[in-house]
Image (cartoon, rainbow, N blue to C red):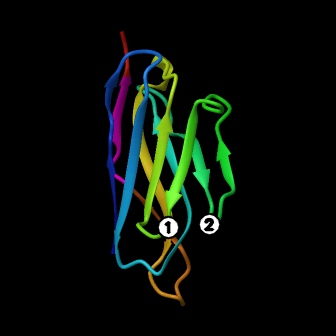
Amino acid sequence: QVQLMESGGGSVQPGGSLRLSCAASGTIYSINAVGWFRQPPGKQRELVATVISGSSTNYADSVKGRFTISRDNAKNIVSLQMNSLKPEDTAVYYCTADVKMTPWDRASTYWGQGIQVTVSS
């Protein structure tokens, strides 16, 4: 099995910064796409940012220029640097990864349990 563990959430004032990290562990042959989603209170889960193997990134319009996603392939860690945070960034943030457990498997999508980010004065 594969586990994803998020860390780095918390509370911050508007304009502040936080860095989220997600470490993948377990039986991992390769990781393709990784990313972050978020679910604001009372709303549906939405894409924040993704990065596929290599360096191709994709961001939601609402976070472009403020958030940066990065991955450390050697350590199976994906991070999300969040700057200039706004109250509307308040949400539970989830990391996700498409993982192959063996060379013969199709990739399966795994999710972390989520971590709270609160932006408030």
Q: Dot 2: what SS? A: loop
Q: Which residues are magenta?
A: 112-118
Q: Amino acid at mark 1?
A: Asn
Residue drawn where x is 35% and y is 21% of the image: 12
Percent position (x, y) of residue 6?
34, 49
- Quadrant of the rendered image containing residue 33: bottom right
Percent position (x, y) of residue 79?
46, 49
Q: Residues within 10 Å of mark 2 (few under 14, many from 20)?
A: few
Residue drawn where x is 69% and y is 56% of the image: 56
Q: CA distance from mark 1 to mark 2?
A: 9 Å
Residue drawn where x is 39% and y is 53% of the image: 22
Image height of 76 relative to 81, above or below: below
Q: Dot 1: what SS? A: loop
Q: Residues within 10 Å of mark 1 (few under 14, many from 20)?
A: few
Image height of 78 relative to 103, above or below: above
Q: Amino acid at mark 2?
A: Ser
Question: Contact, CB < 8 Å: mark 1 with mark 2?
Answer: yes
Residue position for label 1: 73
Viewer-proximal residue among 43 and 58: 58
Percent position (x, y) of residue 68?
57, 41
Residue drawn where x is 41% and y is 67% of the image: 75
Looking at marks 1 and 2 on the same chain, the residue that comes earlier in the sequence is marked by 2
The quarter of the rendered structure image containing the C terminus is top left
Image height of 114 relative to 55, above or below: above
Q: Which mark is residue 53?
A: 2
The quarter of the rendered structure image containing the N terminus is bottom left
